[in-house]
Every structure is written in structure tokens, then in C-alpha cells.
Image (cartoon, rainbow, N blue to C red):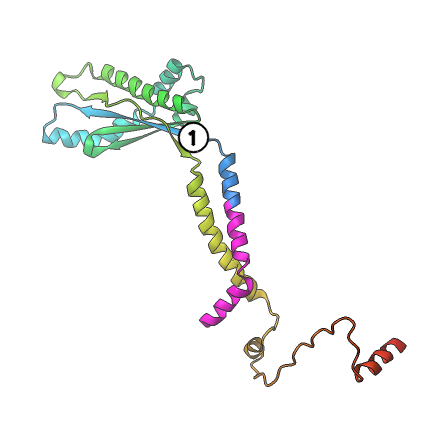
């Protein structure tokens, strides 16, 4: 299809595109408003010890298992008991995420909750409980071989992570624009009405040699021409 025909389609049906964009944007904003807000607080644990080069490589390999030990029922149950959340270990673990940071020998703990203050409290308590439990397990090890885990800093102020209304609306706007363009060309493809001489030539493969213009409407009160009067009388007599 030549570029001119694409532009012609957009001129005929382009009004559909803004309607689809507006509908998608309003829908995304409505969905964002109906979602429960989720806040996230982050705290970091530092892993230290008296490592030589070989021990450093070993510690790096062990960092991921150390991080995953935070997500245990034992830790979650103790946090739930101390904070008196009455959520249960499974529900509490679903709100916590951990990630090892190998280059810094740190463990990042994220806590999500609908209450920003409680998200900070959960992050802080998970770090504290795990630090205590790990220290208790290391007591039987020689001092030179111990791995020390300590809280690096206070938890960060909780920030809203869901819903991100601006991102949702921007994404819906772009998607609505794409769907609007596709809908315009789909409707034009399904429309088999012949409206121009070019349509006739394209669909029938015949050259258009003449056009019959649309007869203009007769203004009210204008007298009929001599040729129109007999025709009108004939119609009335039938």
C-alpha cells in the first residue's frame, strides 16, 4: 500500500486513535487507584572475617547460601513473635526478599508491607534475628575461621513500590496508541465499501472513465424546474 493510502486511512479513521488512548489511560489510572499500596524498606548485612585469598573465594561461594538462610521459618517465626504481628511465618516470608551482593560481601534484605513503618520494623528485625542466630552458630568455630555477620546500617525509609501510577499510565498510553493504530487499519481492511475511483480501480481492476456527481439538495421553497414538475405529478398519481 502506498504511503498516500496509509495517510488517507489515518485521515478517515484517525479519530479512533485518541479514543483508544484515552480509554486505556483512564483504565490504567483506575486500576492503579484500586490497588493496595505496597511500601518497601531495605537493610544490609555485612559479611566479614579473617580471609586470605582462598578463603575469600570460599566466602563468595557461601554468600548466597548465607543469604538464603535468612528466609527460614525459624527466623520468620522469631520475627513474628517479637513484633507481635500474628501473620505466621509463611505470610511473613512472602513479604521479604534477599539478595547477595558479592562485590561488597553484603546481603540485602527487602521487606514489603502496606504500612511503611511496619515494613521498616520487619526489615530491621529480620536483620537482627539472623545476626543473633548466626553468631550463636559460630560460637563453636575457632576465632580465625569465624564468619561475622553484622547489620551495616538502619533500614531505609519505606518507599512506595506498588502501584507505580505514572509508569502504569505511561505504559497504557503507549499501548493504547499502538492498539488504536492497529484498530484503524483493521477496520479499513475489513471495510469493502467502494467510495472513491481509486477503490473501484483497485478492487475491480477496471479503469474508471466517468463519475456521476451527487445531485445537490434543492433549497426549501425553490420552484421545481419544468422537467421536474411532470415527474413529481406522476409520482403523486401513482
Q: Quadrant of residue 82?
A: top left
Examine the structure image and report whether residue 13 is included in the region drawn in magenta: yes
In the image, residue 86 sits, relative to residue 60, either above or below, namely above
Give the vertical position of 198 relative to 126 (above or below).
below
Residue at image point 24% right, 14% down: 136
**Quadrant assignment, res 90:** top left
Residue located beneath label 1 in the image: 38
**Would you say the magenta stretch is mainly helix, strand or loop?**
helix
Find the magenta span and give its range: 1-25
> How many marks can you see?
1
86 shown above or below 44: above
Q: Position of residue 13 (x, y in %)?
A: 55, 62
**Which residue is depicted at the point 58% across and 65% down?**
190
Closest to the observer, 235 or 49? 235
In the shown orientation, is residue 173 left or right of residue 191? left
Left or right of 62 on screen, residue 30: right
Point 44% across, 36% down: residue: 163
Query: Does residue 104 appear anywhere in the picture?
Result: yes
Quadrant where the C terminus is found in the figure? bottom right
Residue 185, how many percent across, how many down?
52, 63
Residue with the most extreme left position: 52
Residue 83 pos. (x, y %):
39, 15
Q: Secondary structure at mark 1?
A: strand
Q: Is residue 106 magenta?
A: no
Which one is in front, 81 or 192?
192
Query: Would residue 238 be seen by someone viewing this image from the given angle?
Result: no
**Percent x, y for residue 92?**
40, 23
Q: Residues within 10 Å of mark 1 (few under 14, many from 20)?
A: some
Amino acid at each position: 500500500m502506498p504511503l498516500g493510502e496509509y495517510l488517507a486511512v489515518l485521515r478517515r479513521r484517525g479519530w479512533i486513535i485518541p479514543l483508544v488512548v484515552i480509554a486505556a489511560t483512564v483504565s490504567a489510572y483506575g486500576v492503579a487507584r484500586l490497588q493496595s499500596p505496597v511500601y518497601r524498606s531495605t537493610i544490609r548485612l555485612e559479611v566479614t572475617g579473617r580471609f586470605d585469598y582462598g578463603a575469600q573465594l570460599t566466602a563468595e561461594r557461601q554468600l548466597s547460601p548465607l543469604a538464603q538462610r535468612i528466609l527460614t521459618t525459624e527466623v520468620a517465626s522469631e520475627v513474628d513473635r517479637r513484633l507481635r504481628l500474628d501473620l505466621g511465618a509463611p505470610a511473613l516470608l512472602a513479604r521479604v526478599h534477599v539478595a547477595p551482593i558479592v562485590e561488597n560481601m553484603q546481603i540485602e534484605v527487602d521487606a514489603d508491607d502496606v504500612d511503611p513503618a511496619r515494613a521498616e520494623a520487619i526489615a530491621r528485625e529480620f536483620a537482627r534475628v539472623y545476626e543473633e542466630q548466626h553468631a550463636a552458630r559460630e560460637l563453636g568455630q575457632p576465632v580465625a575461621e569465624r564468619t561475622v555477620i553484622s547489620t551495616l546500617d538502619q533500614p531505609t525509609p519505606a518507599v512506595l513500590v506498588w502501584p507505580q501510577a505514572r509508569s502504569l499510565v505511561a505504559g497504557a498510553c503507549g499501548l493504547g496508541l499502538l492498539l488504536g493504530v492497529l484498530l484503524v487499519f483493521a477496520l479499513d481492511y475489513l471495510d469493502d465499501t467502494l467510495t472513491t475511483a481509486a477503490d473501484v480501480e483497485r478492487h475491480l481492476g477496471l479503469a474508471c472513465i466517468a463519475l456521476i456527481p451527487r445531485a445537490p439538495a434543492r433549497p426549501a421553497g425553490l420552484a421545481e424546474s419544468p422537467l421536474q414538475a411532470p415527474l413529481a405529478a406522476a409520482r403523486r398519481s401513482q
